[in-house]
Image (cartoon, rainbow, N blue to C red):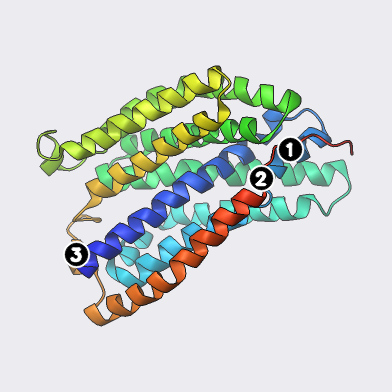
């Protein structure tokens, strides 16, 4: 395998991991006011992502850093083409981070309300904009960007509701299951439209026989999302979360499959790539560091695997 191909696959893996892990973070932050009725329940909901949200953001930093090092022309082209939405994404992530960090340090209800608003806006804005950016990158029009944004926002909300149902008990768990079913009324139709548009985004794959595996990934992602909704309805939150995560993972695979070998208009990965020496050094660094990062994050999820209960304030 050529190093350019290898590093494109690495970047696709990092972005997909970010979508899967940060997806439920966004969903929890967005839905926290709807899933809780008092301060104890609000802490219960936000506590589900408390130990992991900042670690999940590392996937974004790593993905963008890998793009900068391995494909600087792709990095520069994407950031300059989508300067405003990516600036808003960054602003949303900052506001959300401040809200999550400061919420436990303030004591007045009005201050906590401002933190909650920041968490909700800072979660919903990036969740919508990431879908819009990548849909625009594929199709190059505003309608596609709108559909992509609605898809990513609704699927993140569903993913987050399922995660809260998996990690909590009592009234919050029941409320999260009902919310997941309600959100699915938007998420599933949006997924059908958005995911089917991924393999047909390029002329070369408009015919399904030209790249059948892209259609398989898109259809499998849609089926996984529908299965997740059915599993939530049956009270199988663990399998439902696996299904919604699989939807995002398969959607990411289809997305970057459609972007290969031209991630930007009139720019191939070969043209965008760094020199062989730079890619070689990056490969050795990545092979040495990545197992430790993955192992540490898996360990952190294992440590904080138990359900949370609403403790009196």
Circle 2 sits in a helix, a strand or a loop, which is it?
A: helix
Q: Is residue 262 left or right of residue 83?
A: left
Is there CB contact under 8 Å for labels 2 and 1?
A: no
**Picture quadrant of residue 193:** top left
Q: Residues within 10 Å of mark 1 (few under 14, many from 20)?
A: many
Q: Nearer the viewer, residue 223 or 118?
A: 223
Q: CA distance from mark 2 to mark 1?
A: 20 Å
Q: Nearer the viewer, mark 2 or mark 3?
A: 3
- Residue at 45%, 45% (x, y): give it: 129
Q: Identify the residue position indicated by label 3 in the image.
A: 1
Marks 3 and 1: in contact by CB < 8 Å?
Answer: no
Residue 42 showing in the rendered view: yes
The residue lying at 38 percent from left, 70 percent from top is 287
Q: Does residue 11 sit above or below 17 in this rendering?
A: below
Q: Quick check: marks 2 and 3 in contact, CB under 8 Å?
A: no
**Relative to 49, does residue 84 appear above or below in the rendering?**
below
Q: Quadrant of the N terminus?
A: bottom left
Q: Nearer the viewer, mark 2 or mark 1?
A: 1
Residue 117 sits in which quadrant?
top right
Left or right: 262 with respect to 36?
A: left
Kindly report the distance in space between the C-alpha atoms of the residues bearing marks 1 and 3: 45 Å
Callout 3 crowding tier (Cα within 10 Å): few <14, some 14–19, many ≥20 = few
Looking at the image, is mark 1 or mark 3 earlier in the sequence? Answer: 3
Q: Distance of mark 2 from mark 3, alpha carbons?
A: 42 Å
**Residue 258 at what x, y percent from top left?**
23, 46
Compared with 235, 94 (above or below) is below
Q: Position of residue 128 (x, y in %)?
A: 47, 40
Q: Label 2 neighbourhood size at 10 Å, few (<14), some (14-19), many (20+)?
A: many
Quadrant location, the C terminus:
top right
* Residue 126 makes an appearance in the image: no
Badge 1 is on which residue?
308
């Amino acid at each position: 395998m050529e190093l350019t191909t290898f590093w494109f696959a690495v970047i696709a893996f990092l972005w997909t991991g970010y979508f899967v892990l940060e997806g439920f973070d966004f969903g929890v932050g967005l839905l926290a006011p709807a899933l809780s009725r008092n301060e104890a329940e609000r802490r219960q909901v936000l506590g589900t992502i408390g130990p992991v949200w900042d670690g999940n953001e590392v996937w974004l930093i790593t993905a963008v850093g890998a793009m900068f090092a391995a494909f600087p022309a792709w990095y520069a082209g994407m950031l300059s083409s989508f300067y405003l939405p990516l600036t808003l994404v960054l602003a949303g992530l900052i506001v959300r981070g401040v809200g999550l960090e400061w919420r436990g340090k303030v004591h007045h209800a009005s201050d906590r309300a401002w933190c909650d608003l920041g968490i909700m806006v800072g979660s919903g804005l990036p969740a919508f904009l990431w879908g819009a950016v990548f849909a625009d990158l594929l199709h190059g029009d505003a309608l596609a960007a709108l559909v992509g944004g609605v898809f990513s926002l609704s699927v993140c909300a569903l993913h987050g509701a399922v995660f809260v149902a998996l990690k909590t008990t009592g009234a919050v768990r029941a409320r999260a299951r009902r919310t997941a079913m309600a959100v699915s009324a938007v998420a599933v139709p949006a997924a059908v439209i958005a995911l089917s548009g991924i393999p047909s985004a390029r002329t070369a794959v408009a015919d399904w026989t030209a790249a059948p595996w892209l259609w398989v990934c898109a259809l499998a992602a849609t089926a996984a999302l529908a299965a997740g909704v059915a599993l939530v309805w049956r009270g199988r939150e663990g399998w439902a979360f696996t299904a919604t995560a699989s939807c995002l993972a398969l959607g990411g695979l289809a997305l970057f499959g459609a972007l290969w070998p031209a991630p930007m208009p009139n720019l191939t990965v070969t043209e965008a790539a760094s020199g062989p020496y730079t890619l070689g050094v990056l490969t050795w660094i990545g092979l040495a560091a990545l197992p430790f990062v993955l192992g540490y994050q898996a360990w952190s999820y294992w440590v904080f695997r138990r359900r949370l209960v609403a403790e009196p304030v």
